[in-house]
């Protein structure tokens, strides 16, 4: 799956992303630390919220973090590197589904927190692209409302003024 995920547009062959595998008992340890951090940041929380934080990384047997790494380069913009990482995350999601697994790509409040990123082994100079949760899923995946595709494109009508 990682090999498939890595087959993305990568201007300059910089590999401006990396993958972190969270599996086994470490997923519960991360959950406990995230629950503690949530209390530190928000104050006392109801047990239901604490349980939600404790189980964030243990709902699937494997969670793969996709992380953007800024590479210094004078000709390739950082936004392009970040998009390459997004393509890697999407390929990872497709690879897991193609192999018959259930997969979900998420991010959450800890993705932009330096303390949260530290818990997850992500450096201050790195950005979270997302976490792909991989396992099996019993039942039908819920469908979300999607945009009307006919509103998402237009035929070219010439240059835009101003």
Image: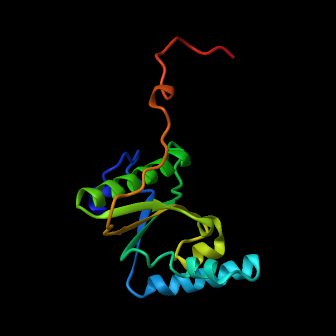
Q: Is 66 displayed left or right of 97 in the figure?
A: right
Viewer-nearest residue: 34 or 4: 34
Kindly give the residue lying farthest to the front in the view shown. 139
Kindly give the residue lying farthest to the left in the view shown. 99
Residue at 29% x, 61% y: name it: 96
Residue at 41% x, 44% y: name it: 11
Q: Is 25 displayed left or right of 49 in the figure?
A: left
Viewer-nearest residue: 113 or 39: 39
> Whole-percent x and y of residue 22?
41, 77
Viewer-nearest residue: 91 or 15: 91
Q: Is residue 10 above or below residue 59?
A: above
Query: Disc count in the image?
Result: 0
Kindly give the residue lying farthest to the top in the view shown. 158
Q: Which image quarter: residue 62?
A: bottom left
Say whether residue 19 is visible.
yes
Q: Is residue 88 above or below residue 34?
A: above
Location of the N terminus by quadrant is bottom left
Q: Is residue 158 above or below residue 52?
A: above
Location of the C terminus by quadrant is top right
Residue at 52% x, 50% y: name it: 73
> Whole-percent x and y of residue 82?
51, 51
Q: Which image quarter: residue 137?
A: bottom left
> Whole-percent x and y of residue 119?
57, 79
Residue at 41% x, 61% y: name it: 104
> Whole-percent x and y of residue 106?
49, 61
Q: What colour scheme was applied to this rendering of the protein? A: rainbow
Say whether residue 67 is visible.
no
């Amino acid at each position: 799956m990682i090999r498939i995920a890595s087959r993305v547009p990568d201007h300059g062959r910089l590999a401006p992303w990396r993958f972190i595998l969270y599996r086994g008992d470490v997923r519960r340890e991360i959950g406990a630390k995230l629950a503690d951090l949530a209390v530190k940041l928000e104050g006392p929380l109801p047990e239901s919220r604490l349980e939600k934080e404790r189980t964030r990384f243990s709902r699937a047997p494997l969670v793969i973090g996709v992380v953007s790494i800024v590479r210094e380069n004078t000709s390739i913009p950082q936004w392009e590197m970040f998009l390459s990482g997004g393509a890697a995350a999407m390929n990872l999601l497709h690879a897991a589904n193609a192999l018959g697994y259930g997969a979900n790509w998420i991010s959450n409040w800890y993705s932009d927190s330096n303390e949260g990123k530290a818990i997850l082994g992500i450096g201050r100079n790195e950005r979270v692209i997302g976490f792909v949760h991989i396992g099996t899923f019993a039942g039908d995946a819920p469908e979300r409302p999607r945009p009307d595709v006919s509103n998402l494109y237009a035929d070219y009508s010439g240059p835009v003024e101003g």
